[in-house]
């Protein structure tokens, strides 16, 4: 099947935006949850910037399958999460991230929350025992070079990884930079005092809906320059809604690739959506 690129010219919004009636829809807080919990260093102002970050990270990463019995645990500091692992044929120890430490503990059947409370030497002994006696025998590691070598994921040997940059690249085929160069863009903002939705709001750390962390990516874009008329409001004005979608992925196994598409009437400042219909694909 060929790849279809939809890079339509941007339609100008009506001056001042669109009058909408959010009472005719329902609130969806999925994007608002992301907006509320993401620190500044996980917020991006364009798809190009986000892609450059996750693509560069991928190019500095490697994945391999190793025997669990061949992994050696070193307790270098007091904290259990400061443990280092010596992997087979590795030139230097790797430092597990918070997420990878939890995955490793789960694989060997040890509660990560308990291990994190132990002195590092004792936590190391427990992990080493579990690795040596792990019945599955093999795991797939995912390591990234960034000044030091981080172990970002530990999964089963048959884990199929979709890299975060692959999702971003797929979205860029229809959304360009996500800033208005195509019809798909970071959304505008609803003015509650007037009921007018303004699609042309400056993209900033406060308004962006393009997110990426060391364990996932989440993107939300809308086609809010091209409203669809669904009837008439009681005052006779058109009942308008727009197309939108969000998608997510985790190359370290924190979540599976997924997407939800929907029609929405507006997006407010804290990124709550007022939607007409939602359909999810996992």
Image (tube, rainbow, N blue to C red):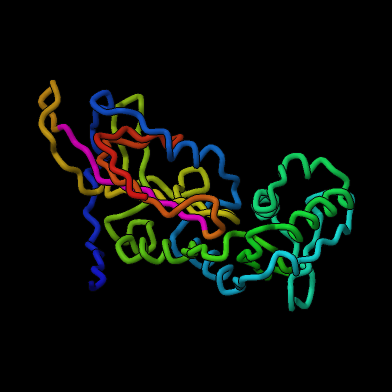
Q: Which residues are magenta?
A: 239-250
Q: For residue 61, say whether it is visible.
A: no
- Residue 272, horizontal then vertical, whole percent: 40, 34
Q: Which image quadrant for residue 28?
A: top left
Q: Is residue 166 left or right of residue 2?
A: right
Quadrant in which the N terminus is drawn: bottom left
Q: Is residue 33 left or right of residue 140?
A: left
Q: Which image quadrant for residue 263?
A: top left
Using the image as rendered, state which of residue 218 and residue 126 is in the foreground.
126
Residue farthest top in this picture = 234
Q: Residue at x 68, y 54 (%)?
A: 104
- Residue 10, horizontal then vertical, whole percent: 24, 57
Using the image as rendered, state which of residue 158 and residue 36 is in the foreground.
158
- Residue 66, horizontal then vertical, whole percent: 66, 70
Q: Residue at x 69, y 56 (%)?
A: 97
Q: For residue 127, say whether it is visible.
A: yes
- Residue 254, horizontal then vertical, whole percent: 54, 51
Using the image as rendered, state which of residue 239 and residue 86 is in the foreground.
86
In magenta segment, residue 120: no
């Amino acid at each position: 099947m060929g790849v279809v690129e939809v890079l339509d010219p941007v339609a100008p919004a009506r001056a001042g935006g669109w009058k909408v009636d959010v009472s005719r829809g329902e609130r969806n807080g999925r994007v608002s949850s992301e907006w509320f919990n993401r620190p500044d260093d996980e917020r991006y102002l364009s798809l190009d910037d986000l892609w450059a970050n996750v693509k560069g990270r991928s190019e500095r990463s490697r994945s391999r399958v190793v025997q669990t019995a061949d992994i050696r645990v070193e307790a270098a500091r007091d904290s259990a999460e400061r443990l280092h692992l010596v992997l087979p044929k590795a030139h230097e120890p790797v430092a597990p991230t918070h997420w990878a430490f939890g995955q490793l503990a789960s694989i060997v059947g040890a509660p990560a929350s308990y291990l994190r409370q132990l002195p590092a030497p004792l936590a190391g002994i427990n992990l080493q025992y579990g690795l040596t006696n792990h019945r599955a025998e093999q795991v797939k590691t995912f390591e990234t070079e960034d000044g030091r070598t981080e172990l970002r994921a530990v999964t089963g040997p048959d884990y199929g990884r979709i890299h975060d940059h692959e999702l971003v690249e797929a979205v860029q085929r229809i959304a360009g930079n996500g800033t208005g160069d195509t019809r798909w863009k970071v959304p505008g903002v609803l003015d509650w005092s007037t009921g007018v939705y303004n699609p042309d709001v400056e993209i900033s750390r406060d308004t962006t809906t393009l997110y990426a962390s060391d364990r996932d990516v989440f993107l939300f874009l809308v086609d809010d320059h091209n409203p669809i008329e669904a009837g008439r409001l009681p005052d006779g004005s058109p009942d308008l809604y727009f197309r939108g979608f969000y998608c997510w992925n985790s190359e370290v196994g924190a979540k599976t690739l997924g997407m939800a598409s929907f029609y929405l009437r507006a997006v407010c400042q804290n990124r709550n959506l007022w939607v007409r219909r939602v359909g999810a694909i996992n």
